[in-house]
Every structure is written in structure tokens, then in C-alpha cells.
Image (cartoon, rainbow, N blue to C red):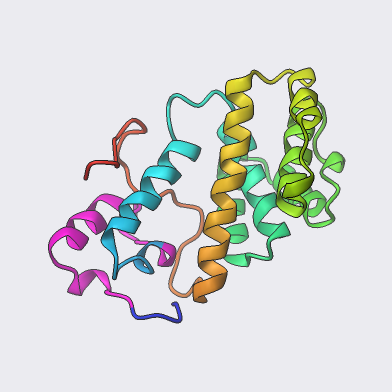
């Protein structure tokens, strides 16, 4: 499941066991990206705090569908099949449309999101794509373009943060050889409320 040692749930004790119990998916699964943190449970807690805040917090204003689409696109650009498959499955569950999901995937894999998106959503994906491919070339004008597309500054922050989160997650997966073995796809870890504070656990 990864290139480093991991502590699997049946062997977990203490802080790690408590954290595993909190991050289980609805079917009891703990994703491999999470078990890869097992030698440093504090980083698992930090990862979950960021993940929950960026993608699942009730305070977010941008739709989960768009945030997941950004995650799929960033992961594809970074070559992270693990995150593409997980978050594409999650996106399809949110869409509940057997034609829309594949059309979105094709457009993102072709790096032509305009084939499946328009308006503000397309502007968000184009920004995410540029930030992923050429982060040093982002300029204030790119933020102005997002405002012109209709996003508030808080919503621009959400777009930035989901793009940055997936850069982190993708590099964790790719750098540690984390695979999909034994996983069901597209289930969000933890049934805790969106407002749970992970920073002090």
C-alpha cells in the first residue's frame, strides 16, 4: 500500500487508534493515504484538519462538485492516479449523472476544461490549472479575472486552498508510493461534522 512501513488498524494503539476510529469512512475503511501517516499520528491529524476544512466545511460557499472537479484536475496534472480515481468517484456520486461525469473527466484529461465547463467554474479550473503547472507565473491579474468571473475574495481563497491541498496530497501519494489496493473509491473519511476542530485532538 506504500513504500514505508505502516501500522494497520488492527494493530493500532493509543492516539493512532483513536484517530483511526475518527477517520473511518462510512464502510469502516481507512484510506491508504491516511494509514501512510501511521508512524506520525500528529501528521494524520493535521492532514485531516486541512482536508475537512478545504473540502467538507459548512463554511465553504463554493459547491462540493466544483471543489471536487478542481481536485481531479489538479491531481491529473500532477500525475496522481490515486487522487484522480478517488475524487472522480466522489464527483460522480455528487453529480448523479451517468453522462456528465465521463464528459468532465475527458475534458480534464485533455486539459481542455472548457469542453465541459463555462462561466465561473471554467475560470476557477483555469486558475487551478495555471497554479498547478506554473505557480510562479500567477499574477494579481489572475485574481482580478476570478473576481470578474463573479467570485468573492473568500471564494477565491477556497479555490486557492483546494488547489494547494491537492498539491500536498498528490506529492504525499507519489512520494511514498501509496496505491489503491483494497480500497473502495469515493467515500469521504469520517462522519464527523464539517465543523469538527481537528487542530487540538
Q: Nearer the viewer, residue 186 or 152?
A: 152
Residue in the picture at 33% in, 30% down: 195
Query: Is residue 18 located in the magenta-colored stretch of the structure?
Result: yes
- In the displayed structure, 65 sits above or below 47; it is above
Is residue 109 rendered to the left or right of residue 189?
Answer: right
User: Can you give x and y, in whole percent of width and height, for residue 197 in the image?
Assistant: 29, 36
Is residue 194 rendered to the left or right of residue 118?
Answer: left
- In the displayed structure, 82 sits above or below 49; it is below
The stretch of residues the image draws in magenta is: 6-33
Residue in the picture at 34% in, 80% down: 5
User: Can you give x and y, in whole percent of width and height, for residue 53 in the image?
Assistant: 43, 37
User: Can you give x and y, in whole percent of width and height, for residue 23 in the image?
Assistant: 31, 52
Query: For residue 18, which quarter of the picture?
Result: bottom left
Residue in the picture at 57% in, 70% down: 174
Query: For residue 116, which quarter of the picture?
Result: top right
Considering the image in quadrants, where does the C terminus appear? top left
- In the displayed structure, 2 sits above or below 128; it is below
Is residue 73 rendered to the left or right of residue 11?
Answer: right
Q: Nearer the viewer, residue 98 or 180?
A: 180
Q: Tell me if residue 152 can be seen.
A: yes
Residue in the picture at 23% in, 41% down: 200
Q: Tell me if residue 99 can be seen.
A: no
Q: Nearer the viewer, residue 165 or 81?
A: 165
Considering the image in quadrants, where does the N terminus appear? bottom left
Query: Is residue 15 located in the magenta-colored stretch of the structure?
Result: yes
Q: How many marks?
A: 0
User: Can you give x and y, in whole percent of width and height, for residue 79 in the image?
Assistant: 68, 65
Is residue 150 rendered to the left or right of residue 91?
Answer: right
Amino acid at each position: 500500500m506504500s513504500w514505508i512501513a505502516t501500522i494497520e488498524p488492527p494493530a493500532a494503539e493509543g492516539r493512532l487508534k483513536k484517530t483511526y476510529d475518527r477517520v473511518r469512512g462510512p464502510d469502516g475503511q481507512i484510506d491508504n493515504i491516511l494509514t501512510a501517516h501511521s508512524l506520525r499520528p500528529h501528521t494524520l491529524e493535521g492532514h485531516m484538519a486541512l482536508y475537512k476544512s478545504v473540502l467538507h466545511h459548512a463554511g465553504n460557499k463554493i459547491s462540493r462538485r466544483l471543489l471536487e472537479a478542481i481536485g481531479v484536475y489538479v491531481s491529473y496534472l500532477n500525475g496522481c492516479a490515486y487522487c484522480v480515481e478517488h475524487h472522480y468517484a466522489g464527483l460522480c456520486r455528487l453529480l448523479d449523472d451517468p453522462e456528465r461525469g465521463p464528459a468532465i473527466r475527458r475534458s480534464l484529461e485533455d486539459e481542455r476544461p472548457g469542453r465541459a465547463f463555462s462561466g465561473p467554474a471554467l475560470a476557477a479550473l483555469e486558475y487551478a490549472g495555471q497554479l498547478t503547472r506554473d505557480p510562479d507565473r500567477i499574477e494579481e491579474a489572475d485574481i482580478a479575472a476570478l473576481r470578474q468571473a463573479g467570485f468573492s475574495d473568500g471564494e477565491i481563497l477556497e479555490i486557492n486552498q483546494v488547489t494547494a491541498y491537492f498539491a500536498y496530497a498528490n506529492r504525499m501519494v507519489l512520494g511514498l508510493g501509496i496505491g489503491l489496493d483494497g480500497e473502495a473509491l469515493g467515500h469521504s473519511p469520517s462522519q464527523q461534522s464539517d465543523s469538527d476542530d481537528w487542530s487540538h485532538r
